[in-house]
Image (spheres, rainbow, N blue to C red):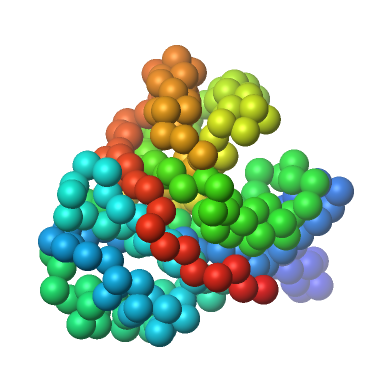
């Protein structure tokens, strides 16, 4: 009976799910940012929207939609997702936004995640994304979802790592040249259309962001293992909330 008890405990230990994020050098964290993007059309002026966001004191960025002269996009984020279901929900359902038509095809929700190699895990998960989207010198952004094909999931870890390394190298090249910075969010089970990731490309100018998307087309991941990509929201900042601790 003792042996059976040990066997049951071992099986339970092996089956315990570990949902912590892991970085380099044994870093672990249970904190991450949830970031949500919503788009609307029918906006004649943005002052009312800015006033509503400021009054609600939510962390947010308001974008002018380049492809829709009456369109706007709203990016919000919080460590505790309950904020998205309360404070953010209240302001987006309030009078200022209620007069607009929501564009559900652009609704995106994701969470920051780690790949295991991050030198500063907390900065990667919490501070870097906020720093990027709140940088007044980087007003341009492209936001889009993507879904990998099932064939990618069936590759062995070594094969997946090689494909992701190629993809990541292209992105780092643009980041090191200060042309485009990326925010990568996992959205497994959080997305209406079953996408896997939400990507935000942010920069000083629009052309390098488009050029990065073009360069990614040639990678193995994009050319062979993506099932869907987009729609793409192209925006320019018209308001950013104050940086908060």
Give the residue drawn at x 30%, y 34%: 228
Task: Out of 78 and 15, give the one closest to the viewer.
Answer: 78
In which quadrant of the rendered view does residue 217 lie? Answer: top left
Residue 195 visible within the image: no
Residue 200: image location, x then y, percent: 46, 45
Q: From this viewpoint, which residue is outermost toward the right?
A: 25
239 is higher (above) or lower (below) than 85: above
Residue 78: image location, x then y, percent: 52, 71
Quadrant placement of the C terminus = bottom right
Give the mark count.
Answer: 0
Residue 151: image location, x then y, percent: 41, 27
In this image, 82 relative to 226: left or right? right
229 is higher (above) or lower (below) than 8: above
Give the residue drawn at x 39%, y 42%: 142
Quadrant placement of the N terminus = bottom right
Give the residue drawn at x 57%, y 53%: 135
Residue 203 visible within the image: yes
157 is higher (above) or lower (below) than 107: above
Task: Out of 124 and 238, give the one closest to the viewer.
Answer: 238
Residue 68: image location, x then y, percent: 18, 47
Task: Out of 214 and 141, give the one closest to the viewer.
Answer: 141
188 is higher (above) or lower (below) than 49: above
């Amino acid at each position: 009976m003792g042996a059976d008890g040990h066997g049951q405990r071992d099986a339970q230990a092996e089956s315990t799910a570990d949902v912590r994020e892991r970085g380099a050098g044994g870093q672990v964290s249970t904190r991450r940012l949830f970031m949500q993007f919503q788009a609307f059309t029918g906006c004649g002026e943005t002052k009312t929207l800015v006033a509503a966001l400021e009054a609600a004191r939510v962390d947010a960025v308001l974008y002018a939609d380049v492809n829709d002269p009456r369109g706007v996009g709203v990016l919000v984020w919080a460590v505790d997702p309950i904020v998205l279901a309360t404070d953010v929900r209240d302001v987006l359902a309030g009078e200022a936004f209620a007069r607009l038509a929501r564009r559900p095809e652009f609704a995106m929700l994701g969470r920051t995640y780690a790949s295991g190699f991050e030198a500063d895990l907390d900065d990667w998960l919490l501070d870097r994304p906020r720093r990027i989207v709140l940088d007044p010198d980087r007003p341009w952004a492209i936001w889009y979802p993507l879904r990998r094909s099932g064939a990618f999931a069936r590759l062995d870890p070594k094969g997946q790592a090689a494909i992701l390394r190629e993809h990541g190298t292209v992105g780092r090249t643009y980041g090191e040249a200060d042309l485009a910075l990326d925010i990568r969010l996992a959205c497994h089970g959080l997305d209406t259309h079953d996408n896997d990731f939400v990507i935000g490309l942010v920069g000083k100018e629009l052309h390098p962001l488009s050029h990065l998307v073009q360069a990614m087309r040639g990678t193995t991941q994009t050319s062979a293992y993506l099932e869907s990509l987009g729609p793409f929201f192209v925006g320019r900042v018209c308001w950013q909330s104050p940086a908060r601790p």
